[in-house]
Image: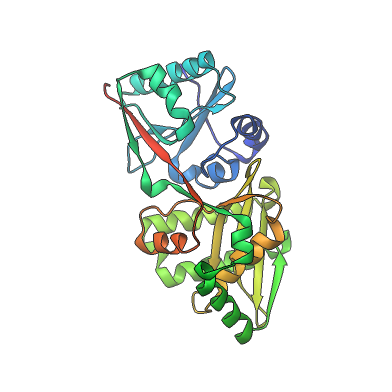
């Protein structure tokens, strides 16, 4: 039977070894993302041959598994899925895989045949942009973004500051103020996001991500966090700013890309979760593609 363990900061090196061989496209498959959401999703993992198996047992939805993580072979994939399938059967759970990458579907189809239903999960599709588009904001399609930045620069004194350990407290404060405006503690999804963000900030040294803040009129008012996802893509995990300062979100996005990700071809800004305002905002930056994700449900228990 699959022997599962809780995710801790000490697992980073292990996960990074498997993730580097996996060459992930979806934003969820970075150790930072797995670690920051480990309490909300109740992540557990185990090793099967050359692959890591990651399972989520959240409090309010059905348990599910991720695609196995690592370098794929037909035999290695079969061995991992056999173990996951048996684990779910022993628990009496319906076997479901979520956030499955498009290029992994053929492995599932070959293993399960017609015993699975495959559904495109649009709300969790990641938005991917050319980094140079986000830096230069050139052309008519980015005219509004340029106006926001120009307006911000005219109205405020500002400074871009790379995140360091001594500035973590400023990020926590910005996070708290952002949440206070939205009554995060009264909304489970927002509360879980707040806690996940704080987990990242509290483990700045151990996780090893990049970050930045914007100081506006002498006070830090925005911060962002990201890291390399794969060989040609960076992923942005967090972006929080004072909503009352027009153009601040646009400015920190542009500055972070220019200062940290100009040598990376793509920037993944994660999903919109089906939230209308978030979808509109992400579409307004003109993604060059989406990373499609799928739900795979086994038809039998």
Closer-to-camera residue (96/93): 96
In the image, residue 67 above or below residue 137: above
Can you say which quadrant of the picture contains the N terminus? top left
Q: Position of residue 27 (x, y in %)?
A: 52, 45
Q: Nearer the viewer, residue 43 or 254?
A: 254
Residue at image position (71%, 68%) is 161
Residue at 69%, 65% (x, y): give it: 167
Spot occupied by residue 59 in the image (x, y as percentages of width and height) = 36, 42
Residue positioned most to the bottom: 155
Residue 109 visible at all: yes
Viewed as shown, does residue 250 lie left or right of 100? right
Question: Residue at 55% across / 78% down in the picture?
Answer: 147
Measured along the vertical axis of the image, is residue 125 above or below residue 86?
Answer: below
Image coordinates of residue 261 in percent, x first then y, are 68, 55
Q: How is the image coloured?
A: rainbow
Residue 169 seen anywhere in this rendered image of the structure: no
- Can you give x and y, in whole percent of width and height, for residue 236 in the image? 57, 54
């Amino acid at each position: 039977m699959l022997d599962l363990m809780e995710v801790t900061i000490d697992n980073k090196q292990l996960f990074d070894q498997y993730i580097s061989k996996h060459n992930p496209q979806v934003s969820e498959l970075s150790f930072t993302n797995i670690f920051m959401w480990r309490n909300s999703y109740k992540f557990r993992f185990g090793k099967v041959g050359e692959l890591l198996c990651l399972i989520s047992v959240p409090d309010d939805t059905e348990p599910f598994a991720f695609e196995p993580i690592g370098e794929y072979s037909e035999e290695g994939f079969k061995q991992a899925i056999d173990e996951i399938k048996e684990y779910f059967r022993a628990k009496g759970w319906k076997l479901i895989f979520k956030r499955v990458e498009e290029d992994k579907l053929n492995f599932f189809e070959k293993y399960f045949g017609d015993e699975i239903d495959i559904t495109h999960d649009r709300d969790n599709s990641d938005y991917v942009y050319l980094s140079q588009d986000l830096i230069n904001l050139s052309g008519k399609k980015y005219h509004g973004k340029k106006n926001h930045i120009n307006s911000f620069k005219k109205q405020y004194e500002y400074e871009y500051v790379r995140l360091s350990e001594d500035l973590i407290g400023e990020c926590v404060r910005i996070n708290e103020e952002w949440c206070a405006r939205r009554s995060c503690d009264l909304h489970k999804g927002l509360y879980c996001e707040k806690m996940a963000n704080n987990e990242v900030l509290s483990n700045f040294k151990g996780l090893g991500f990049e970050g930045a803040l914007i100081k506006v009129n002498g006070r830090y008012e925005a911060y962002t966090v990201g890291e390399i996802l794969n060989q040609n893509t960076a992923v942005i995990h967090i972006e929080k700013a004072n909503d009352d300062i027009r153009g601040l979100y646009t400015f920190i996005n542009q500055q972070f890309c220019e200062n940290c990700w100009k040598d990376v071809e793509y920037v993944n800004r994660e999903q919109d979760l089906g939230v209308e305002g978030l979808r509109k905002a992400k579409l307004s930056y003109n993604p060059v593609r989406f990373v499609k994700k799928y739900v795979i449900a086994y038809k039998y228990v």
